[in-house]
Amino acid sequence: MSPRAEPPPAPATFSKSEMMIVAAARELAGQHVCFVGVGLPNIAVNLAKRTVAPDLELVYEAGVFGARPARLPLSIGDPTIVTGATAAMSMFELFAFYLQGGRIDVGFLGAAQIDRFGNINTTVIGDYHRPKARLPGSGGACEIAINARQIFVIMRQSRRSFVEKIDFRTSPGNVGGAANAERIRREQGWLGRGPSVVVTDLGIYHFDDSGEMRLDSLHPGATIEAVRDTIGWEPQVSPDLAVTPEPTAVELELMRIELDPGGAYTR
Amino acid sequence: MNTSKVATMHDAIAAIVRDGDTVAIEGFTHLISFAAGHEIIRQGRRDLVLARMTPDVIYDQMVAAGVARKLIFSWLGNPGVGGLNAIRRVTEGDQPSLELEEYSHFGMVARYTAGAANLPFFPLRSYFETDLPVVNPLIRPIESPYGDGTVYAVPPLKPDVTIVHAQRADANGDTQAWGLLGCQKEAAFAAERVIVVVEELVDEALIRADPNRTIIPGLIVDAVVVEPWGAHPSYVQGTYDRDNRFYLDWDPISRDPAATDAWLAEWVHGLDGRADYVEKLGAERLASLRPSAPAPSGSVDYGEYR
């Protein structure tokens, strides 16, 4: 951020998507190496790099470490992630040495469906062999969920996306609960500790000792009722439920002018 | 010493790609040979097994044109836009007509790597506690022979033909690329036959002046096709940008089967080849895709040792 003579004025309005992206970006404060997923993670991570985490190393599955994108890439294989990066390499090197070798602190993913334990579906809606909707599939998400030290998820909340039972497990979270997940990770030698944050258009969830997501912060204007109406199970709610601080003028300006002037992600 | 492998796209596809082949047109967002895909459509190949990590718009077009019977892939979408609608039409609902065999990205990279290295499988730490091995029985758990746990194995993928785009090659097929390298090298070494499509044909001396940049040697190349703008609407680092507008425009076209057929008639069947396509795109569109400024690398000194 460029230095300013005086603090910017408080923003007049912001969209639910802008609040979600800002909240997700702030969660990256203090993190070092982040593997950037397709779509919403891309703008959240790029916003974090320009605000709370200027030293964040951006890793793109296309084969880039230490990216410094000068514009928000529409696809995650955009030429702007290469120019000025620390390293561009084959995808074998990226997945084998950087990810599976244990160099990734945060894997930042989107999802079509998620369950209370943070297991993710991005493959199909309905039966696999006769799907109602065919989704993209894993990409790198399956191995990111297993090998990144922790997983952040950003996605909009709805009865279709926050479900009691996902239709297909593409990327494992806390499987059937924390005790089960810990045993599995230990026995199978996973490097990852699984999901730690889910940010939606209504609030911020972290994972409690049982491995289930718990609502820790409500975004301004969101209500517990709205959360319950858009989730397929009875959600855990923190006794110390906070209200997410509103986006600052700086955060909004970065998104609206620099990162997403067309409003592809933020509307 | 070496004879030239330079061929037209028409002749290269006619000689090298056969009905029923497993064909990999690779390139991760970058360096995707749309020109080769269009020529395969134009020549009416049938029953192809199309392999690609990310099928992208090119395989949506090829599936719409009826060349494919099966896809092998790891991420099936229009990057940055949404779904691949022609593929969705034949993979959703009660009677899908296109066979799918799916992996994760690392699984696909590992398959090409095993194919290139003549290994019976490649091990990876992925797929634990997921449904992918359930729906794809070729993804199998194996015990470490050293007694330290279980990993998953994927089988080698050896395409009959791999086609990759690159910045430059010499007439022998010694090929150099920079930017995102995807799995161009692995997919080429895994294949029985290889076509490289390049923006620029260069002297062997230029290749030899920078050997670290060579990703594919002429040793494994069967044909070199010189096709400027051959990757459009994909891109070539340093030469032209990804035409994101095209990817966005493809979404409504591909949602409508009649519009899809009309597009194929106008932009593929109605043209003789890439030179016509480039002319039809027009100078203004092309100019808008040039990089905003050059960003040359520094040069390195290999030294001479006699």
Image (cartoon, helix red, strand yellow):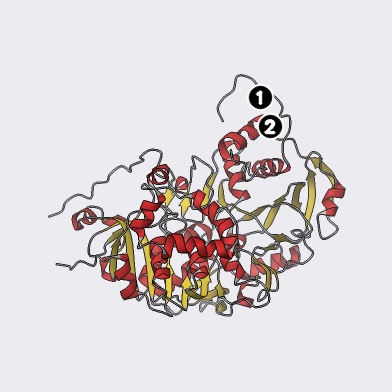
Please, is residue B138 above or below residue B27 in the view?
Answer: below
Which numbered dot is residue B82? none
Residue at 49% from the left image edge and 43% from the top image edge: A69
Please, is residue A214 above or below residue B54 in the view?
Answer: above
Please, is residue B276 above or below residue B222 in the view?
Answer: above
For marks 1 and 2, give the CA distance. 8 Å
Instruction: Confirm whether residue B33 shows in the render.
Output: no
Which numbered dot is residue A248? 2
Q: Mark 1 lies on which chain?
A: A
Residue at the far top: name it: A5
In this rendering, position of residue A210 left or right of residue B164? right
Q: Are marks 1 and 2 in contact (CB under 8 Å)?
A: yes
Which numbered dot is residue A8? 1
Instruction: Name which residue type carries label 1.
Output: Pro
Residue at 81% from the left image edge and 41% from the top image edge: A242
In this rendering, position of residue A205 left or right of residue B181? right
The quarter in which the N terminus of chain A is drawn is: top right
Can you tell which quarter of the image residue A25 is in? top right
- Residue B239, given in percent of the width and then of the height, sits at 36, 48
Instruction: Confirm whether residue A212 shows in the render.
Output: yes
Instruction: Name which residue type carries label 2.
Output: Thr
Can you tell which quarter of the image residue B3 is in? bottom left
The quarter in which the C terminus of chain A is drawn is: top right
Local packing at callout 2 (Cα closer than 10 Å; few below 14, some 14-19, many 20+) is some
SS category of the residue bearing label 2: loop
- Residue B208, given in percent of the width and then of the height, sits at 21, 56
Residue nearer the viewer, B1 or B90: B90
